[in-house]
Image (cartoon, rainbow, N blue to C red):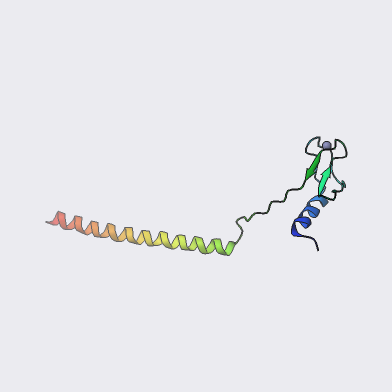
């Protein structure tokens, strides 16, 4: 069974878009050697495949939950601000009346 890395390389190579990093000669159909290197048939430049796998934003449910939590925090801040302003307003009115 192939490793995920090998499978990624096989699928990427099947797309046929690889060119020599030195002379831009097309590497379509050029086999990899026993060490996994690809040797450019035009100039002899040796290359190896580098596979980088990283996580990216993508779990919509998790993002929605986080956004809802943030919005709850915003609503709480607005309620606190309205209460504080109301108290200040009442105090200001009492000061004017006195
Ligand atoms: Zn080349």
Q: Nearer the viewer, residue 59 or 8?
A: 8
Q: Which of 28 and 92 is in front in this view?
A: 28
Residue at x-position 49% and y-position 63%: 68
Q: In this view, does 47 lie above or below 56?
A: above
Find residue 22 and report its image quarter: top right
Q: In which quadrant will I find the N terminus? A: bottom right
Position of 65 with respect to 21 (left or right) is: left
Residue 60 at x, y percent in the picture: 59, 62
Residue at x-position 32% and y-position 58%: 81
Residue at x-position 37% and y-position 59%: 77
Residue 18 at x, y percent in the picture: 80, 44
Count of labels in the image: 0
Position of 60 with respect to 51 (left or right) is: left
Quarter containing ligand 1? top right
Residue 50 at x, y percent in the picture: 73, 48
Position of 46 with respect to 74 (left or right) is: right
Residue 74 at x, y percent in the picture: 41, 59
Q: Which of 38 and 63 is in front in this view?
A: 38
Position of 89 with respect to 69 (left or right) is: left
Q: Is residue 30 above or below residue 4?
A: above
């Amino acid at each position: 069974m192939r490793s995920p890395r090998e499978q990624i390389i096989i699928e990427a190579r099947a797309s046929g878009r690889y060119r020599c990093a030195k002379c831009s000669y097309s590497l379509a159909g050029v086999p990899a050697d026993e060490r996994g290197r690809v040797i450019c048939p035009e100039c002899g430049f040796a290359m190896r495949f580098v596979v980088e796998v990283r996580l990216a934003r993508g779990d919509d449910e998790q993002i929605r939950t986080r956004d809802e939590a943030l919005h709850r925090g915003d609503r709480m801040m607005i309620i606190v601000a309205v209460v504080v302003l109301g108290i200040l307003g009442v105090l200001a009115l009492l000061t004017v009346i006195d």
